[in-house]
Image (cartoon, rainbow, N blue to C red):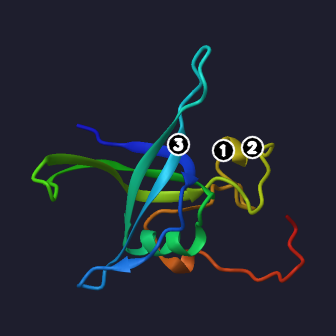
């Protein structure tokens, strides 16, 4: 059996970090993912709910904001519940195992990253976060001398 979801889209609102009563970090956010074009049709967009836990949630809330492109590797989870009116409902969401940057700061639509290709580090490896340690990334303050 296999349950794997790989998505590249844009975050629709700033993710907010919350904590469970046991102080476990969690965030949920929505990603807008374009469907491929079909003949004589406008591009359609799916809005997919994402949940990230622990250090992945902290990473997303620290480095991603509304409108940023994000790549998500995770799995689909289905929950059944009863709403306030007594109707049975089903909710689908993607649990993020890994997240990656797909564009640099202020990327234009012409860049390869904006087309959904992962950004490469100076060593040639993709820049990503795989449920690792927050120390895997270092925030650099370049002041107003940003190269991009």
**Coordinates of residue 103 in the picture (x, y in percent):** 69, 54
First in residue order: circle 3 vs circle 2: 3
Q: Which of 53 and 90 is in front in this view?
A: 90
Q: Give the number of the disc on residue 84.
A: none
Q: Is residue 15 shown left or right of residue 114?
A: left
Look at mark 3 in the image and give the residue it sits on: 33
Nearest to viewer (mark 3 / mark 2): 3
Look at mark 2 in the image and give the residue it sits on: 112
Q: Are marks 3 and 1 in contact (CB under 8 Å)?
A: no
Q: Is residue 120 shown left or right of residue 73?
A: right
Q: Nearer the viewer, residue 136 or 118?
A: 118
- In the picture as drawn, the residue positioned furthest to the top comes out as 39
First in residue order: circle 3 vs circle 1: 3
Look at mark 1 in the image and give the residue it sits on: 117
CA gap between label 1 and label 2 equals: 6 Å
**Tag 2's secondary structure?**
loop
**Tag 1's secondary structure?**
loop
- Asked which quadrant contains residue 125, the reply is bottom right
At 85% from the left edge and 64% from the top edge, which residue is drawn?
Answer: 148
**Coordinates of residue 133 in the picture (x, y in percent):** 48, 76
**Coordinates of residue 105 in the picture (x, y in percent):** 74, 63
At 72% from the left edge and 60% from the top edge, which residue is drawn?
Answer: 123
Q: Are marks 1 and 2 in contact (CB under 8 Å)?
A: yes
- In the picture as drawn, the residue positioned furthest to the front comes out as 85
At 82% from the left edge and 81% from the top edge, which residue is drawn?
Answer: 142
Query: Quadrant location of the N terminus?
Result: top left
Q: How crowded is mark 1: few (under 14 residues within 10 Å), some or many (20 or more)?
A: some
Q: In this view, does 96 lie above or below 92?
A: below
CA gap between label 3 and label 2 equals: 17 Å
Q: Is residue 59 shown left or right of residue 27?
A: right
CA gap between label 3 and label 1 equals: 14 Å
């Amino acid at each position: 059996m296999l349950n794997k979801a790989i998505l590249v889209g844009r975050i629709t609102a700033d993710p907010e970090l919350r904590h469970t009563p046991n102080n476990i970090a969690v965030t949920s956010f929505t990603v807008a993912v374009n469907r491929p074009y079909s003949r004589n049709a406008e591009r359609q967009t799916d809005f997919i709910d994402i949940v990230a836990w622990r250090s992945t949630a902290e990473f997303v809330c620290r480095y991603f904001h509304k409108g940023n492109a994000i790549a998500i590797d995770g799995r689909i989870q289905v929950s059944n519940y009863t709403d306030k009116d007594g109707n049975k409902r089903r909710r689908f969401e993607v649990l993020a195992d890994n997240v990656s940057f797909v564009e640099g700061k202020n990327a234009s639509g012409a860049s390869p990253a904006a087309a959904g290709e992962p950004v490469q580090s100076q060593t040639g490896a993709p820049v990503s976060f795989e449920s690792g340690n927050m120390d895997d990334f270092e925030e650099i303050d370049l002041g107003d001398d940003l190269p991009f």
